[in-house]
Amino acid sequence: VNEIKSDIQIAQESKMTPIRDIVENLGISETEWEPYGHYKAKLSLSLMDRLEKNKDGKVILVTAINPTPAGEGKSTCTVGLGQALNKIGRRAMIALREPSLGPTMGIKGGAAGGGYSQVVPMEDINLHFTGDIHAITTAHNALAAMMDNHIHRGNELGIDVRKVVWKRVMDMNDRSLREVVVGLGGPLKGVPRESGFDITVASEIMAILCLAADLKDLKHRLSKMVVAYTSDDKPITASDLGAEGVLTLLLKDAIKPNLVQTLENTPALIHGGPFANIAHGCNSVMATKMAAKLSDYVVTEAGFGADLGAEKFLDIKTRAGDIDPDLVVIVATIRALKMHGGVSKDNLKEENVEALKNGLANLEKHVETIRQFGLPHIVAINRFLHDTDAEIEALTSWCNEQGINVVLADVWAKGGEGGRELAEKAVALIEENDKNFTHMYDVNESIEEKIKAIATKVYGAKTVEFSSYVKKQMADYARYGWGNLPVCMAKTQYSLSDDPSKLGRPEGFTITVRELKPSIGAGFIVALTGDVMTMPGLPKEPAALKMDVDEEGRAVGLF
Ligand SMILES: Nc1ncnc2c1ncn2[C@@H]1O[C@H](COP(=O)(O)OP(=O)(O)O)[C@@H](O)[C@H]1O
Ligand SMILES: O=COP(=O)(O)O
């Protein structure tokens, strides 16, 4: 185990192909892309116009069980499966989200996959990449500045400074910015009011970038963002502030999907990076649809467990992008199942078949959820070094007894070679086409009914409690005409419930909805549950402490 190379060592030793070669292999013409260095590119939106008539490739969604804080390998398995499909002679691309600096410098580390299934250049991808997240941060904060300037200059729109819902953002975990007071210092320095910061990946502008169909749709969605209310509760939007034009200008390059490659030169589109616990957790519709036009299979992922990313992919992203998914891969790990079976995070490397069996209830619920969506599915056991044959055997035979397709994936250690069986099974299931995709709820149901549908059918909750403030919000939203939008649940990723300590498959629990937030531009209503935060904090030992640059100027410590 000691000689195992770190993700960054493997990535830095890899031989990347110039991105020009990847572009040419995809049949993309000179006017349809622009290089960002030798190994990154942005694809022009005009490419979609030309590809419109192409047959769509099959869409494979990678989700997981409720994870440990380190994550269970969705990005790794997405990359590994994409590589494996190419190894078995299928034309496949992958579509991933862009990592946020929050987790990269925090607890989780990067999001470029791992081992021999990574996208590269991983340092760039995990740090500033092509600047999209910085552009989103700037656009979000420009709107905040324009709103506070409007208030300072006489507040013609009659914004009630106690009813401003638009905060500022920063792509960093910084708990000190959760609650702030702006405008202090007297008449020349603005109007004092309470506010705060969210992490950029929770910004509605991030969600809009991920759900917009094209530049025109981006601008239309940006115009509808609600920033505040008047004292008689009239919503004030970005277009009321005349901001949609400048916001679109600030995002004109960020809207273009980014092309990179995997360690095995499989083309990868990385675009957008919303978290799945506090946002909708999916990469952009544009990148996913572009990948589907450029290949026969697109493997894409949605954050955290099927209760979060997969539910939002299947209920929000498919509606926004008219995407018809073909297969779901549910990543399970022995370590996470042992955690759900009661093992503490420090003892997950020790064999414990009993605990594994006790934790299977969590996997069982996520399989049931994907069955409710009417989609074919495979459980991919993402093999870790410390997994024992007895544990793998116990998990595999349980799946077989339950009639659940299961494959052992060794893509972290072996790259595409370790995913051949998974790729073959995926192709076979897609060709069987035994699917009856259906959403978890009808958007025309009330907000309350939609939240209850998700909580009971996807989380397994017994009841849902709405605070009196939320009940008033639901009545207001219905009056504003926002009642027929999908719901984006903000909930802890660690538990099916809204209590992060309830692992496994909790039953008989109540989901408590404490607040709604309108994301009218993105086209959904955010429902905040439990104590979920939209600005995470750094852990006791941030990964940032290990990060540096060596004498040759190369990044170190990005794991
Ligand atoms: N099979 C594996 N063995 C060892 N480490 C792994 C394995 N799969 C993933 N990892 C590591 O775990 C972390 C989380 O993997 P990632 O693919 O980002 O998970 P997710 O996308 O589900 O959050 C990464 O550091 C990755 O290198
Ligand atoms: O939104 C969270 O995504 P991961 O599951 O990739 O950490």
Image (tube, helix red, strand yellow):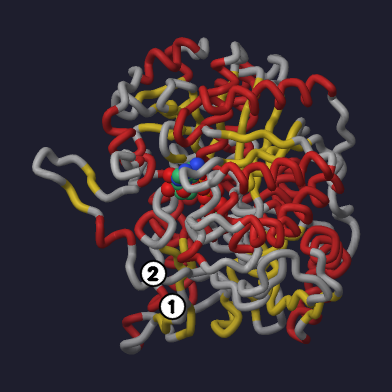
Judge by depth and name the residue closer to the eye, 96 or 450: 96
Q: Which residue is mark 1?
A: 152
- Is there any visible trace of residue 273 in the rendered image? no
Q: Which residue is mark 2?
A: 538
x, y percentage for residue 257?
50, 33
Real-space Cα distance between discs 1 and 2? 34 Å
Binning the other alpha carbons within 10 Å of mark 2 as few (below 14), some (14 to 19) or many (20 upward) gives some
Q: In the drawing, does residue 174 fall left or right of residue 295?
A: left
The extreme front residue here reads 390
The earlier-in-sequence mark between 1 and 2 is 1
Q: In the drawing, does residue 395 fall left or right of residue 549?
A: right
Q: State if disc 2 and disc 1 touch (CB < 8 Å).
A: no
Location of the N terminus by quadrant is top left
Q: Amino acid at mark 1?
A: His
Check the image and report above or below for 320 versus 352: above
Check the image and report above or below for 22 versus 208: above
Residue at image point 44% right, 37% down? 253
Residue at image point 53% right, 68% down? 344
Q: Quadrant of residue 55?
A: top right
